[in-house]
Image (spheres, rainbow, N blue to C red):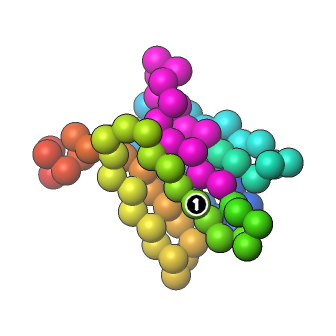
């Protein structure tokens, strides 16, 4: 897994996923190697983190450590 920072959150992504952050709109877009949109994460006007997955995935939220992990759903079938 690779780690990126998104404001005060840590985002852990599978190696084949890429992230693009727009600091102005407080949005993060996650894409896979084929440039397919996989998820959007943003911080809303109440400073709450929002997640919109667009694919079959596993999202783990560790609110104590402010960390989010994103994996393909195949992770569940293989582990």
The quadrant in which residue 29 appears is top right
Q: Residue at x 39, y 63 (%)?
A: 60
Q: Nearer the viewer, residue 15 or 58?
A: 58
The single residue placed furthest to the bottom in the displayed view is 64
Q: Is residue 13 left or right of residue 23?
A: left
The quadrant in which residue 59 appears is bottom left
Q: Nearer the viewer, residue 41 or 10?
A: 41
Q: Is residue 1 visible?
A: no
Q: Residue at x 85, y 48 (%)?
A: 24
- How many dots with numbers? 1
Q: Secondary structure at mark 1?
A: strand
Q: Is residue 19 left or right of residue 77?
A: right
The residue segment tinted magenta is 29-42
Q: Which residue is mark 1?
A: 50
Q: In this rendering, is residue 48 above or below 51?
A: below
Give residue 11's position: percent from left, percent from top: 56, 55
């Amino acid at each position: 897994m690779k780690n990126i920072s998104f404001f005060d959150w840590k985002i852990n992504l599978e190696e084949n996923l890429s992230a693009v952050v727009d600091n102005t709109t407080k949005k993060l877009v996650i894409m896979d190697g084929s440039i397919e949109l996989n998820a959007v994460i943003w911080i809303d006007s109440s400073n709450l983190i929002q997640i919109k997955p667009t694919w079959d995935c596993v999202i783990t939220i560790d609110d104590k450590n402010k960390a989010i992990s994103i994996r393909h759903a195949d992770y569940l079938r293989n582990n």
